[in-house]
Amino acid sequence: MCKVLKVSRSSYYKYLHKKPSNRLLENQKIEKEILKIHKDSKNNYGAIKINKELKAKGIIISIKKTQRLMSKLGIKSIIIKKYRPASSKKRIEAQENVLKRDFSATTINEKWVTDITYIHTIKDGWCYLASVMDLYSRKIIGYAMCKSIDTALALQAVKNAIKLQKPTKPLILHSDLGCQYTSSAFKDYIESTKLITHSFIGKGCPYDNACIGSFHASLKKEAVHLVKYFDYDAARLAIFEYIEAWYNRKRINGGIGYLTPQKCEDLARKIS
């Protein structure tokens, strides 16, 4: 074989007994951690979040090196085009925008945002998820699912948020101009709390509610678009597991210093 390869026997045996360099061993260790972090995130994390998790484990490397190693390993964040429902031609009346794209908050239960998204099932067709997010912790503090998109769905999500958070001080609830949120029933309930000021996005300005939109986009990318739910019950269970077991308690969020929403809320409660 040495003759065929045109190398000396001494070089060949030296190559067989060559020990891997420290740099190679270190990279192999890092690659193993990257694969574990990526798997634990259900293949959702990209280079930035993997890099943050590596630093938390005491492995300090640049984002560029993280990207190179991920490319070498053939892994990347899941990216799937999200569903966009057709726009309604119904005339929408403008309402007061109290939030005005100020998504910052000084503590929990100060600013909440809410919206409804669509989830498809094989048996039951479209189902609907209403979610409420706390802008300080980015935690999903209330949600509800239903086979129909109506005011009751939007109200139930808000009622669940109030039941969980038990707010005692005035807060802002920000939503779009959908009929579920502009209905008299929703308005009456909000006024009955004597705590909540209702704020609305501007007409044709979806970025006015970007944070809750970002959550729904992540939900679709990381869970909904990866499978086909058989029916409403299967979808509801999957959404519950995503929010409670993953998003709120394990998924780090760049908008809150790469903490999990639950950790962010826990720290806020300790301070208050």
Image (cartoon, grey):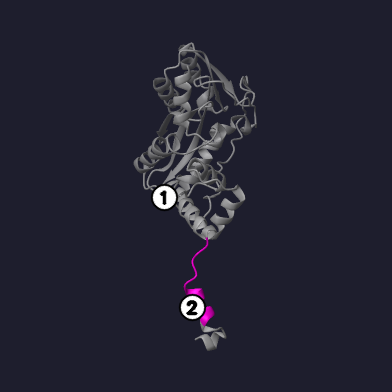
Q: Residue furthest toward the bottom?
A: 3
Question: Which is closer to the viewer, label 1 or label 2?
Answer: 2
Give the mark nearer the N terminus: 1 vs 2. Answer: 2
Q: Amino acid at mark 1?
A: Lys
Answer above or below: position of 105 versus 217: above
Question: Which residue corresponds to mark 2?
Answer: 13
Residue 63's x, y, as percent? 60, 48
Q: CA distance from mark 1 to mark 2?
A: 55 Å
Q: Position of residue 218 (x, y in %)?
A: 51, 41
Residue depicted at 48% across the width and 19% down the height = 271
Magenta stretch, residue numbers: 10-21
Q: Secondary structure at mark 1?
A: loop
| Badge 1 density bin: few <14, some 14–19, many ≥20, Cα 10 Å | some
Q: Residue at x 48, y 22 (%)?
A: 268
Q: Say which residue label 1 marks.
A: 228
207 left or right, relative to 137:
right
Farthest front residue?
10
Q: Nearer the viewer, residue 241 or 105?
A: 105
Q: Give the structural element (helix, strand or loop) at label 2.
A: helix
- Residue nearer the viewer, 203 or 139: 139
188 part of magenta stretch: no
